[in-house]
Image (spheres, helix red, strand yellow):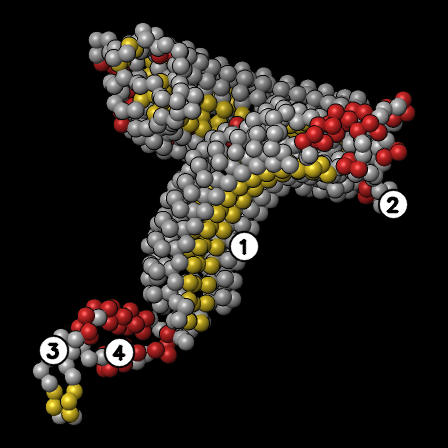
């Protein structure tokens, strides 16, 4: 029944309800009023009438279908360009799928505060204004999938305090601002699948205290910060499959205390090191369809609850007994070229003793080729001279030319990966499958990359040319590589590169030129790199950054220039980089903070200046980036003084500050550092007098996150630089040792040098 069919319902209720409690005796005779049940229910009736009239005041939008019994409004597939203004106020479910809204403004849902379910799927939405959903405090389900959203602003989801399901899959998300989820304390499910995320920064999911499942499948994630998943105590399932991870984010994953299921399949990880997975609560682990070639037997030792491991469809040739797997019930190794010979006998005996279900089809020796491991008796698993000489691999179809593979290389057609790593090759081979996505040529001796050598590699996304003794990339070297995103040229002998080399690969987002022989950043190198996101030139011999050195790098977000010889940065060096967020200048020869050079940047979030010979920081040194800066590294510089207003403008956005291993005796005013989570002040000769009051006030006003456990040794009379110190209250109070030293989680910590402590408290010398 539609709302518009209920126009007379309010009048009907009033006309037929005896609100006075009188009773009719005859047509013209009325008895004296007396209390009745009607009077008891009068407030409820009046509320009902008000609600009905509220609905009547807003007719159903012309393009929509309204159902007052279900309090739902459907406006799907109506080519709407804005949210209808007359949606009835009491609506609980609003379906706006398949429209053309483009923008979600702050006033769109002010008049529908009772919404519980909102579907905005496939509406061509590009921008969600900050505060767009304020007032929807009852909303439980929000679907924003299949839109064109590129960025989530800090306050995009403000006001959604009851939200439990947030779907953002199949957008064009490249960035999620810090704190975007901070008000979603009841969220259970977050779907960010099939987007363009490449980096997960520290505290990316801050505020999601109740989230159970985060889906990040089918993105382009290449880097996961160590603290990316910190603060997710109830996370049970994490999906990171179908990304561009090349190394397991061990530290980041170890921060998830309650994780049960982890999906990492379809990433380009080739090796699992010792203690690679350190998630004590983990029960199900999926590492399928990667490029795993080797795996340490202790890789899962610190995840003792694992009952299922899937490492199917990789490049493993053998497998060892897995340490610490007392509860393992199922291990899937299908699709690996494992030979069931004497080298696997110990593993077979171990699996039989544990009654472990192992899925493995033997690829050799010949007498057991194609047999299931479970069908074999360990005594049958023998090695012969012939077996040791012959290499058994999964068959590669030869019928189709696209499935060919150069000699000495390994092509996995199911993964679309090809590898010729460390084969002693002196020239780049040809004949790789045309659908190859990852091409690994590292560890060879090419000297140069010739013209059109990759002309048939139009689908390659990731190209590895590290450690190849390359001196030169010829013009046209990347011809045909229209899909290339990751280019690895680390550890070569390159001293110059022509910008025109990149003309044929316009999609490149990541360039690794670290550990080469550059003395300057080649002029105009960014001219043909409109999509460059991350630029790595660590450990070269660059001496200066000249005017407009970065011209053309309009989308560059990260610059890594660690361990060069940079002593001068021109004022306009970063002028054209409007989106720069991470700048690493540590281990160079700078003697001053490059304040003037930073005036052209307004979005830097992380600045590393560690190990530069900077002795004094003057007033307003970081003022140009004070509104954006979150992480500041000033450690190991020999820093002697920070001027009183050295941190002018900084504070509210800063989350970590590293000042350890300097020569500081006091600190400047830090009253605005209200969101600081980490501060490291170890190994500084602080004078514990009244000049340390700014630090004392800072620690008294805020909570600073724990980074290490309590040092259980006796601390009486010792310098606090040897401890991680926990504060449970005011700075002047004594830090009490936690009752459970290894596992305690106090709220505050810092590293301080030369504060003497005794059992009564901190000895404040002269202050």
274 lies left or right of 167: right
> What distance separates the C-alpha of mark 4 from that of mark 2?
80 Å
Tell me, yes or no, whether the two marked residues, 4 and 2, touch with CB atoms within 8 Å. Answer: no
Q: Quadrant of residue 762?
A: top left
Q: Which mark is residue 399?
A: 2
Sequence-wise first label, 4 or 3: 4
The span from disc 4 to disc 3 (Cα, nearest Å) is 21 Å
Choose between 268 and 476: the one closer to the eye. 268
Q: Position of residue 519 (x, y in %)?
A: 60, 18
Residue, disc 3: 34
Q: What residue sits right under mark 1 in the picture?
A: 146
Disc 4 on helix, strand or loop? helix
Looking at the image, the residue that sits furthest to the left is 32
* Residues at marks 1 and 2, CA–CA distance in whole angstroms: 39 Å
Residue appearing at x 49%, y 66% in the figure: 76
Depth check: 537 or 247 in front?
247
Q: Please state the horizontal and vertical placement of residue 600, each as a whole percent of the image.
A: 43, 32
Secondary structure of the residue carrying numbered label 1: loop
Query: Looking at the picture, does residue 751 appear above or below residue 56?
Result: above
Label 1 or label 3, whichever lies nearer to me, is 3
Residue occupying the point 69% across, 26% down: 321
């Amino acid at each position: 029944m539609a709302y518009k069919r209920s126009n007379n319902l309010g009048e009907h209720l009033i006309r037929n309800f005896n609100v006075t409690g009188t009773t009719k005796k005859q047509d013209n005779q009325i008895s004296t009023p007396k209390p009745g049940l009607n009077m008891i229910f009068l407030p409820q009736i009046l509320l009902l009438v008000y609600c009905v009239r509220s609905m009547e005041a807003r007719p159903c939008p012309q393009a929509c279908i309204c159902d007052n019994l279900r309090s739902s409004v459907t406006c799907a597939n109506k080519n709407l360009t804005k949210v209808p203004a007359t949606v009835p106020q009491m609506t609980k479910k609003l379906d706006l799928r398949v429209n053309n809204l483009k923008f979600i403004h702050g006033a769109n849902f002010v008049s529908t505060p009772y919404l519980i379910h909102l579907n905005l799927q496939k509406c061509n939405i590009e921008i969600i204004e900050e505060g767009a959903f304020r007032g929807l405090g009852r909303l439980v389900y929000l679907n924003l999938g299949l839109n064109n959203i590129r960025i989530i602003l800090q306050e995009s989801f403000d006001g959604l305090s009851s939200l439990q399901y947030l779907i953002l899959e199949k957008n064009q998300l490249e960035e999620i601002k810090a704190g975007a989820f901070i008000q979603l304390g009841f969220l259970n499910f977050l779907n960010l699948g099939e987007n363009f995320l490449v980096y997960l920064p520290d505290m990316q999911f801050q505020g999601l205290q109740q989230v159970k499942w985060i889906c990040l499948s089918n993105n382009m994630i290449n880097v996961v910060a160590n603290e990316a998943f910190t603060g997710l105590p109830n996370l049970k399932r994490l999906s990171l499959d179908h990304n561009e991870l090349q190394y397991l984010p061990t530290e980041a994953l170890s921060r998830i205390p309650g994780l049960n299921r982890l999906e990492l399949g379809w990433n380009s990880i080739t090796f699992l090191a010792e203690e690679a997975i350190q998630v004590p609560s983990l029960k199900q682990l999926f590492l399928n369809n990667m490029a795993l070639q080797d795996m340490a037997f202790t890789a899962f030792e610190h995840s003792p609850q694992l009952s299922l491991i899937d490492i199917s469809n990789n490049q493993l040739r053998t497998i060892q007994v897995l340490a610490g797997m007392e509860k393992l019930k199922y291990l899937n190794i299908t699709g690996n070229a494992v030979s069931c010979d004497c080298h696997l006998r110990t593993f077979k005996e171990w699996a039989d003793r544990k009654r472990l279900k192992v899925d493995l089809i033997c690829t050799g020796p010949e007498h057991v080729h194609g047999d299931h491991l479970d069908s074999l008796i360990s005594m049958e698993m023998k090695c012969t001279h012939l077996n040791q000489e012959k290499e058994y691999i999964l068959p590669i179809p030869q019928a189709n030319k696209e499935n060919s593979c150069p000699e000495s290389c390994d092509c996995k057609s199911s993964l679309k990966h090809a590898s010729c790593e460390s084969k002693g090759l002196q020239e780049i081979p040809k004949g790789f499958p045309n659908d190859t996505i990852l091409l690994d040529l590292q560890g060879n001796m090419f000297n140069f990359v010739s013209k059109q050598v990759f002309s048939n590699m139009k689908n390659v996304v990731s190209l590895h040319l590290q450690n190849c003794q390359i001196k030169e990339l010829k013009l046209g070297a990347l011809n045909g590589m229209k899909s290339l995103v990751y280019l690895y040229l680390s550890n070569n002998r390159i001293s110059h590169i022509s910008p025109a080399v990149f003309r044929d690969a316009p999609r490149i987002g990541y360039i690794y030129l670290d550990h080469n022989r550059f003395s300057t950043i080649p002029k105009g190198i960014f001219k043909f790199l409109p999509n460059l996101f991350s630029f790595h030139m660590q450990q070269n011999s660059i001496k200066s950054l000249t005017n407009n050195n970065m011209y053309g790098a309009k989308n560059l977000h990260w610059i890594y220039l660690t361990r060069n010889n940079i002593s001068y940065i021109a004022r306009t060096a970063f002028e054209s980089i409007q989106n720069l967020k991470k700048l690493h200048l540590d281990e160079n020869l700078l003697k001053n903070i490059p304040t003037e050079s930073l005036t052209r940047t307004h979005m830097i979030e992380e600045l590393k200046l560690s190990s530069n010979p900077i002795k004094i920081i003057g007033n307003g040194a970081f003022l140009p980036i004070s509104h954006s800066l979150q992480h500041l590294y000033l450690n190991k510089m020999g820093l002697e003084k920070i001027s009183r207003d050295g941190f002018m403008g900084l504070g509210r956005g800063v989350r970590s500050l590293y000042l350890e291993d300097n020569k500081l005796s006091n600190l400047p005013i830090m009253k605005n550092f209200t969101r600081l989570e980490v501060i490291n002040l170890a190994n500084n000769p602080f004078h514990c007098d009244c000049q340390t009051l700014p630090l004392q006030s800072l620690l008294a006003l805020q909570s600073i996150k724990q980074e290490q456990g309590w040092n259980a040794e006796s601390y009486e009379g010792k310098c606090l630089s040897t401890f991680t110190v926990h504060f449970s209250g005011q700075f002047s109070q004594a830090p009490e040792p936690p009752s459970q030293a290894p596992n305690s989680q106090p709220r505050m910590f810092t590293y301080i040098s030369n504060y003497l402590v005794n059992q009564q408290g901190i000895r404040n010398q002269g202050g």
